Image: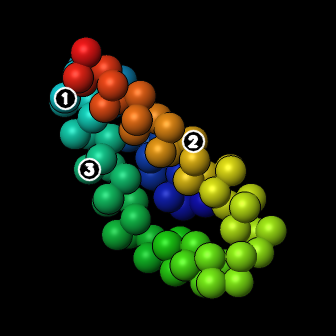
Amino acid sequence: AAVIRQLDAAAPAIAEADGMARLALTVRAHIAAAAANPAYHRILFQEAMSGSERLRWLVDTHERPLSERKLDLIREAQG
């Protein structure tokens, strides 16, 4: 997915940051990737309306890992 490639491209700069800066860079990269690829969230929404197996795959493969990473960064920034 283009969103994941865009986030992967931002990974080196994110890795160099720490704490709140790392979290902020991650959130900005995710928002920029989502804005640059509006079809991604449109597909998620359409699949959510039908509750399809494809939605489960999209969440398990893409959304859940992104959310878990952001939660880890939030915990790190709080720590």
Instruction: Report the coloring of the rendering.
Output: rainbow
Question: Would residue 57 appear left or right of 74 to someone viewing this image?
Answer: right
Q: CA distance from mark 3 to mark 1?
A: 12 Å
- Return the mark for residue 65: 2
**In terms of image quadrants, where is residue 78?**
top left
Q: CA distance from mark 3 to mark 2?
A: 17 Å
Query: Can you identify the residue that label 3 sits on?
Result: 28
Where residue 59 sits in the image (x, y, percent)? 64, 57
Q: Nearer the viewer, residue 74 or 22?
A: 74
Where residue 74 sits in the image (x, y, percent)? 31, 31
Comparing labels 3 and 2, the label whose residue is closer to the camera? 2
Callout 3 amino acid: Arg
Does residue 60 sit above or below 8 in this rendering? below
Q: Would you call the spot at circle 1 few (<14 residues within 10 Å), some (14-19), or many (20 or more)?
A: some
- SS category of the residue bearing label 2: helix
Query: Can you identify the residue that label 1 sits on?
Result: 20
Q: Sequence order check: which comes first, mark 3 or mark 2?
A: 3
Residue 17 seen by the camera: no
Callout 2 amino acid: Pro
Q: Would you call the spot at circle 2 few (<14 residues within 10 Å), some (14-19), or many (20 or more)?
A: few
Which residue does the image show at 45% across and 52% down from the upper left? 6
Where residue 11 sits in the image (x, y, percent)? 41, 34
**In terms of image quadrants, where is residue 51?**
bottom right
- SS category of the residue bearing label 1: helix
Question: Would residue 7 appear left or right of 53 to someone viewing this image?
Answer: left
